Amino acid sequence: MQRADSAAREFFLAPAGRGIRICLSIIMLLGFILLCLLKNFSLADTGPLRIGTAVLFAVPFALMLLFLFRAHPDGSPAVLLMGAAVCLLSMLLRLCFIDRNTGDFEYYLNDWLRVLAGQSFSASMRMRVGEYHVLYQYILFLLTRLPLPWLYTVKAVSFIGDACLLGAAFRLADTNGDRAGGNRALLVLLLPAIVLNGGMFAQCDSLYTVSLLWGLAFILEGKPARGMACMGLAVCFKLQAVFLFPLLPLLWLAGKIRLRDLIPFLAAVLIVQLPAVIMGKAPTELISIYTGQAAMYTNLNYGTPNLWAMLVSDGLDAYAYGTFGIALALALCLLVLCGALRRMDTYGDEDFVGIAALIVLICVFCLPRMHERYTYAAEVLTCIYALRVPRALPAALAISLASLASLLLTAIPLWGGALLMLFAATWLVMMLFGGHEGRSGVSERKWI
């Protein structure tokens, strides 16, 4: 028995070979599909629908396992199984809300899908369907061709974005070969904004955020062309991707990107738009999608824990105060860039992640017309920064609490969430601009 016990322990602690990895993947996938078959999906009431739904949700879970195993090439079966268990639990958290049909889906996405389902691809491209860019319209059109409930397919796309987000988190947390940060990247899957955004609200903020994160990861890895192409894809998903763009001048001055890397950025944007233009959509209409979004929302706040949640906005001139918020955000971003420029020679890759988190947080906090889900990218970036620099953990926790307060009815009022966001921004400023004592692979700072 002692020999068997030692052999079993050695098996679970020794590096897993390719065969063991394949077996673990198959076992975990089959187990997840079985759990899905046992779950009661209200919209999948027949055998074929239940099987199709189980396979559908197995796709993002398989991607999570793929990124997990790639991030741990020398991982033992014990490490891989524990990581796979976190992925499994994160999927189960999302499936808890899978039948939740919110107003965003009922009054918007469902109608858009109904229109696309009755049209050919060329006809649908000539129509103005929804308020998203054509890249997400392509995805919605493909979903109407699947013989599965639309609520499930839309949420599955968001889950796929979550899985790819894990892959980007592994790369960013593992910058400079820091495996310790990479091992903790699984926490990204459990953030409230990520779980609820797709699982409950059927939103697609994971798609533009994952494009931004992969772009930043590629740039920090010395692959700027790929990174800028990913940035172009992010813009094609949602206009909110531009919140990270103030970081690009700093990356250029640091030599991380070059002017010629604008070519893959523009190429990605043009390639995405090309199918719609070929099918008859006017190029001016593609631009008007973004201008129409800006004109559609006129209130100063739409449930975001930011500056405007701390003010009584009734009766205020939305245009004047909104312009003030835009100017304030630009001014603060410029101040951050000026401060970072003076310390750029001492910054490591983790510092650029921190600057990215701070810039996005400033934009969300100051800009008007922000919806509650726009804290998504700021929460993810701050969490990844905290994985690399643990002293940023208070800022990450503050943003997660503020995000949770805006997404759900909690004891924290919206203005309280705004104060948490302000605290997070202040904490990041103190960390990033508080001075340097020395460097030994990780930043060491003293606060002033």
Image: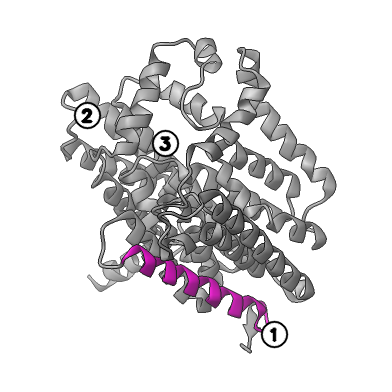
> Percent from the top left, x then y, of residue 59?
39, 37
Task: Give the secondary structure at mark 3.
Answer: helix
Snapshot quadrant of residue 150: top left
Which of pointers 3 and 1 lies earlier in the amino acid sequence? 3
Visible in this render: residue 72? no
Residue in the foreground of this view, choosing between 286 and 135:
286
Image position of 97 (left or right of 420) = left
Q: Is residue 435 in the magenta section?
A: yes
- Residue drawn at (65%, 14%), measured in percent from left and top? 278
Front of the two marks 3 and 2: 3
User: What residue is shown with label 1?
Assistant: 436
Residue that carries the numbered disc 2 in the rendered image: 50
Percent x, y for residue 192? Answer: 36, 58
Q: Looking at the picture, how far across and down is residue 198, in whole percent?
A: 37, 44
Image: magenta residue range: 413-441
In the rendered image of this protein, does residue 264 appear above or below residue 244? above
Q: Give me the C-alpha separation between circle 1 and circle 2.
A: 57 Å
Pointer 1: residues within 10 angstroms few (<14), some, or many (20+)? some
Query: Which mark is drawn over residue 157?
Result: 3
Q: Is residue 109 above or below residue 221?
A: above
